[in-house]
Image (cartoon, helix red, strand yellow):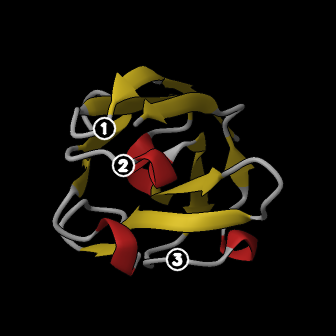
Amino acid sequence: QVQLVESGGGLVQAGGSLRLSCAASGRTFSSYSTGWFRQAPGKERDFVAAINRSGGVTSYTDSVKGRFTISKDNAKNTMYLQMNSLKPEDTAVYYCAAGYGNFLGDQESMYNFWGQGTQVTVSS
């Protein structure tokens, strides 16, 4: 079992930056592949970025490529999402997720554990 807690969300103007963190407790983070998803108001939860168990391979949805960077520090049991050049359409609740095995997952069903989410609001 692993428990996930997101932090770092907030209100930012378009063009600004935020860094989200996902802290894990329980089993060591290096046992899991992890990812970020987001859910905008009235929409389904969508994939944002994923990183494999070691942290050496990453994947992004097209709309955030070149703007967002996913990373993880297994020694600190923490995953990050650096978000630059934010746009109003990035406004959503952001969730971190962890799953058993070594993969890059863009489907919710691939993940076993979820955080409670952190709100990101980008004003125009």
Quarter of the figure that contains the C terminus? top left
Q: Are marks 3 and 2 in contact (CB under 8 Å)?
A: no
Amino acid at pointer 1: Ala
Q: Could you give the CA–CA distance between mark 3 and mark 1, rounded to whole angstroms?
A: 28 Å
Q: Earlier in the sequence, mark 1 or mark 2?
A: 1
Cα–Cα gap, marks 1 and 2: 5 Å
**Real-space Cα distance between discs 3 and 2?**
24 Å
Residue found farthest to the right = 42
| Circle 2 crowding by C-alpha within 10 Å: few under 14, some 14–19, many from 20 | some
Residue 85 screen position, x and y as percent: 21, 47
**Residues packed near mark 1 inside 10 Å, few (<14), some (14 to 19) or many (20 plus):** some
Residue type, mark 3 in image: Gly
Percent from the top left, x then y, of residue 105? 52, 77
Closest to the observer, 64 or 100: 64
Instruction: Using residue 16 as the reference point, say whether residue 32 is left or right of it.
Output: right
Residue 105 is tagged as 3
Return the residue at label 2: 87
Where is residue 120 drawn, in percent x and y?
A: 51, 32
Could one spot residue 73 in this view of the protein? no
Q: Which residue is mark 1?
A: 14
Relative horizontal placement of residue 62, taking residue 116 as reference (left or right): left
SS state under label 2? loop
Q: Is residue 51 left or right of residue 121?
A: left
Of tags 3 and 1, the one toward the viewer is 1
Q: Are dots 1 and 2 in contact, CB under 8 Å?
A: yes
| Residue 24 vertical placement versus 99 (above, below) | above
Q: Residue 14: horizontal and vertical position, in percent?
A: 30, 38
